[in-house]
Image (cartoon, grey):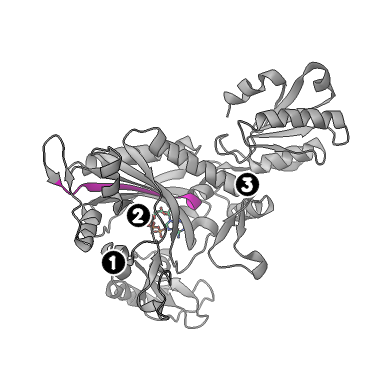
Amino acid sequence: MKKNTADNSMDKIISLCKRRGFVFPSSEIYDGFAAVYDFGPYGVELANNIKKEWWKAMTQMRDDIVGLDSAIFMSPKIWEASGHVKGFSDPLTECRKCHARLRLDTLLDEAGIFADEKMTEDEINIIFEANRDKIKCPNCGAADFTPGRKFNLLVQSNLGNFTGDWTKEPTYLRGETCQGIYVNYKNVLDSARVKIPFGIAQIGKAFRNEITARQFIFRTREFEQMEMQYFVKPGDDMTYFDKWKETRWQFYLDLGIDPANLQWHKHENLVFYAKEAYDIEYRFPFGFKEMEGIHARGDYDLTQHSKYSGKELNYLDPATNEKYIPHIVETSAGVGRTFLAVLSEAYQEEELEGETRIVLKLIPKLAPIKIAVFPLLKNKPELVAKAREVFDKLKMDWRCEFDDNGNIGKRYRRQDEIGTPFCLTVDFETLENSEVTVRNRDNMQQERIKISELENFFRSRI
Ligand code: ATP
């Protein structure tokens, strides 16, 4: 087993993210803003590449799934119908000594006591009382806590409310993207020539007032989800559920993740309407944790929205004339968690002639920069001009970077750290024979390639 088992590897990844411009803490010059992060110049490329791969796998490669981009703000009635206004909450306790607010289920779980966020306030408090002696505040070590209470995770706003006291009738920033899919199900059905079984895919921001948001970008208050809702005939749920489990597992292998770092987690304590729920967990540097959820949700969502909106959300089967509310199998992944998994997987340190080479062994499709183009020397205009010419040609097809700063060894190291699979150098020989040196990130081998052959060379490798 390689890497990401070392205790300090999370610190190393966080440090690389800051140093090389992948992830910055939000509002840093104002001392930060808890549990919110920004993607820097290379981070935005990596996140976009993850989303591109997901979108391709879930829409372009299939003829049964269409895309959607619904708004973040929706009618507040949607969040009542979905159960979020009443029930989207985590159990919270406060340390009476240092006033840290903590998730009670996590505290119990970390002490080896079974608890989860779906328990009622009473259920979790009974377990809490029985185990008080085993629980200490992770912040100050004290053992004096307030009783657990449910804390709603929906983020509220005053959008469209001009009454002065908007808290009485708040609007919400969406807590999950899938509600936008459910409420557009009928529009898609009427406009997109889809037939059951079919899916609707969406990528977008979601917001949650997470109580304890630790572990870098693993748990943030603003994050992005990649969700797909698959509408099936009642009774077919489990057939499609098993297929989606397989398909989504394969997606992570295709992103270069070692199957030894993945595992299934079956939910034992299901919400009342769910038929089955599994998570794909990744071995993050802090242990196996959820990266994606796959849920058989029955007809709960469409039934609720039909009830609250008063609109019929039935499907009329064109072959049998049967009318029914479709059942839903959902796949729900986070961009930030996939980003962190891919980085943890790719991060390697290699000992090279007494120094350490940090290298991100990202698959080329995910690498923020595919090709770095270097003139051997900065102060030779003919080399710079030739390198620019090569760069201008390659940038039409790939995200490239031009770099003429510092010695070649340093330029290689910098590209290794951001995961660039190929570096290309224009030298004096290039001016005579039109060949450049292409250096491979993983084995550091170099080969001479004709400029006219570069496009074919890279096309077969990226
Ligand atoms: P957890 O139990 O870790 O809070 P969850 O079960 O509430 O997660 P879902 O509601 O199933 O998560 O959301 C689907 C996916 O969205 C998760 O698998 C995760 O990748 C992502 N996600 C959820 N909450 C967050 C968050 N606060 N920060 C980053 N990603 C998140």
In the image, is the residue at mark 1 within 8 Å of ligand 1 by its beta carbon? no
Pointer 1 with pointer 2, Cβ within 8 A: no
Asked if residue 330 lies in the magenta stretch, the reply is yes
Reading the image, the residue beneath label 2 is 180
Q: Residue at x 46, y 54 (%)?
A: 224
* Three-letter code for the amino acid on which mark 3 is drawn: Tyr
First-in-chain label (3 vs 1) = 3
Mark 1 closeness class: few <14, some 14–19, many ≥20 residues within 10 Å: some
Reading the image, the residue beneath label 3 is 42
Most common secondary structure along the magenta stretch: strand
Q: Which residue is drawn at 47% across and 75% down?
A: 101
Residue 94 versus residue 338 in the image, above or below? below
Pointer 3 with pointer 1, Cβ within 8 A: no
Out of 44 and 170, give the one closest to the viewer. 170
Q: Which of labels 3 and 2 is toward the front? A: 2
Q: Which quarter of the picture shows residue 245? A: top left
Q: How many labels does the image show?
A: 3
